[in-house]
Image: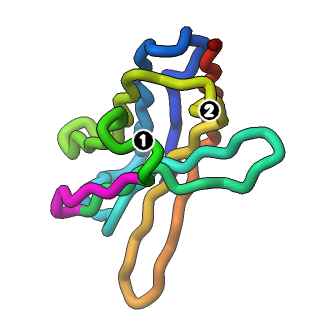
Amino acid sequence: VQLQASGGGLVQAGGSLRLSCASSGKISMFTSMAWYRQAPGKERELVATITSGGRTNYVDSVKGRFTISRDNSKNTLFLQMNSLKAEDTAVYYCNAALSVLIITTYWGQGTQVTVSS
């Protein structure tokens, strides 16, 4: 399975971006999917998760501004980011986890999001 993230770019503070993560396989098989981000000089941070049942969870810093969703018919994961702040600047990675006896994880290549203040 390959994950291809896209949709990053340069946006002014207060603006919006929508990230997409296209899977080469059916995303309905994944136990959960997630978006992570890594800012320069910082560790990779979990931003949002969504389970196969549609349950979502967010890091406190993005609650109310970001929305994670998945479209099984298009095998694509999304992250709608609104009211962007300079501190959201990072490389964003999509992740998928398959839990069958063992947990197997897949990563996309990352897409750069830069928010100018």
Spot the residue most to the right: 41
Q: How is the image coloured?
A: rainbow
Q: Secondary structure at mark 2?
A: helix
Between 58 and 80, the one lying in front of the other is 58
The answer to which image quadrant residue 24 occupies is top left
Q: Secondary structure at mark 1?
A: helix
Q: Residue shown at 22%/40% (left/top)?
A: 71
Between 39 and 76, the one lying in front of the other is 39
Measuring from the top left, give residue 80's x and y in whole percent: 35, 29
**80 lies above or below 62:** above
Q: Which residue is mark 2?
A: 87
Residues under numbered marks 2 and 1 in contact, where contact means CB atoms less than 8 Å apart: no
Q: Earlier in the sequence, mark 2 or mark 1?
A: 1
The amino acid type found where label 1 is placed reads: Val
Q: Which residues are magenta?
A: 52-58
Circle number at residue 89: none
Q: Residue shown at 71%/40% (left/top)?
A: 39
Residue 29 in the magenta stretch? The answer is: no
Query: Disc 2 to disc 1, how far (Cα)?
Result: 10 Å
Measuring from the top left, give residue 35's x and y in whole percent: 47, 48
Between 102 and 35, the one lying in front of the other is 35
Q: Which residue is mark 1?
A: 62
Spot the residue most to the top: 12
Image position of 70 (left or right of 60): left
Measuring from the top left, give residue 87's x and y in whole percent: 62, 32
The answer to which image quadrant residue 12 occupies is top right
Image position of 51 (left or right of 98): left
The amino acid type found where label 2 is placed reads: Glu
